[in-house]
């Protein structure tokens, strides 16, 4: 059966390795930036949500994730950037140079030249807290935000790769047939009413 082979291929492609289908360009996903082999000061733009902020005397460290990878990209910025606007959950666009990292934890880091806050986030009012594991029942209360968590993001990536593998397998000489063109709506009694 093709299931084990396709699942293995899907899981392999969900790692933090760069996606072989896309060539790196000026705008990179976090996954492509983390997998960049020759990072010789290439100017790039990365968009995503802030996972953590650490401020030191002269340097500001951000971890940015866009959902394309389980890992986050470390952004190193000058402390002159306003760290009050840079909070957990805020969406940002970072432009800078992709350089080799001095740390052993990651291969590359982004040396920020410009950080634009696209959407502010009040970290105190945000339902998810940094470094806190939330139960799945709690995540169900926020369906529009739960894909930002590590567990739900990983599930979505695996599901997407599995669906793509199944579609590519059946593309050979099969036709896709949908059993029901419309989504049925259920009454409280349990009868189907047409949408």
Image (cartoon, rainbow, N blue to C red):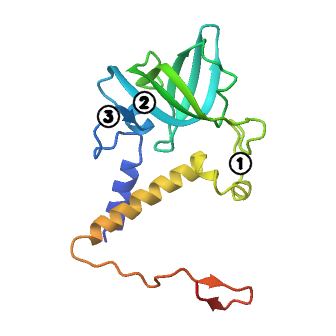
Q: At 65% from the left edge and 57% from the top edge, which residue is drawn?
A: 143
Q: Which x, y percent locates residue 156?
A: 50, 55
Rounded to the nearest whole Å, what is the CA distance between mark 3 and mark 2?
Answer: 9 Å
Badge 2 marks a residue whose secondary structure is strand
Q: Quadrant of residue 5?
A: bottom left
**In the rendered structure, which disc, 3 or 1, sits on the residue that comes first in sequence?**
3
The residue under label 1 is 134
CA distance for labels 3 and 1: 36 Å
Counting other residues with Cα less than 10 Å from the Cα at mark 3, is it few (<14), some (14-19), or many (20 or more)?
few
Could you say which is closer to the camera, residue 101 or residue 180? 180
Count the labels in the image: 3
- The residue drawn where x is 66% and y is 20% is 83
Residue 98 lies, with reference to residue 182, above or below; the image says above
* Residue matched to label 2: 45
The residue wearing badge 3 is: 25
Q: Where is residue 157 in the image (x, y as percent from the top left)?
A: 46, 53
Cα separation between marks 2 and 1: 31 Å
Q: In this view, does 24 lie above or below 157?
A: above
Residue ranking furthest to the top: 58
In this rendering, the label closer to the viewer, 2 or 1 = 2
The mark found on residue 80 in the picture is none
The part of the image, by quadrant, that contains residue 163 is bottom left
| Mark 3 or 1: the one toward you | 3
Mark closer to the chain start, 2 or 1: 2
Task: Judge by depth and name the residue closer to the eye, 77 or 128.
Answer: 77
Residue found at x 63% / y 25% = 53
Which quadrant of the structure image shows residue 185? bottom right
Neighbours of disc 1 within 10 Å: few (<14), some (14-19), many (20+): few
Q: Earlier along the polypeptide chain: callout 3 or callout 2? A: 3
Residue 143 located left or right of residue 27 = right
Dot 2 alpha-carbon crowd within 10 angstroms: few under 14, some 14 to 19, many 20 or more: many
């Amino acid at each position: 059966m093709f299931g084990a082979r396709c699942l293995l291929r899907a899981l392999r492609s969900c790692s933090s390795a760069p996606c072989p289908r896309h060539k790196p360009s000026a705008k990179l996903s976090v996954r492509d930036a983390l997998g960049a082999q020759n990072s010789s000061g290439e100017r790039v733009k990365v968009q995503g949500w802030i996972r953590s902020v650490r401020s030191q005397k002269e340097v500001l460290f951000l971890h940015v994730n866009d959902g394309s990878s389980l890992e986050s990209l470390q952004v190193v910025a000058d402390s002159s950037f306003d760290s009050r606007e840079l909070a957990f959950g805020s969406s940002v666009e970072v432009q800078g140079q992709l350089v080799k990292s001095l740390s052993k934890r990651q291969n590359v880091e982004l040396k920020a030249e410009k950080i634009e806050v696209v959407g502010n986030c009040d970290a105190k009012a945000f339902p998810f807290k940094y470094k806190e594991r939330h139960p799945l029942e709690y995540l169900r209360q926020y369906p529009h935000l739960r894909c930002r968590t590590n567990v739900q993001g990983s599930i979505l990536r695996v599901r997407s790769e599995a669906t793509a593998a199944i579609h590519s397998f059946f593309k050979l000489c099969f036709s896709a047939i949908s059993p029901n063109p419309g989504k049925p709506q259920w009454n409280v009694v349990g009868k189907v009413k047409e949408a």
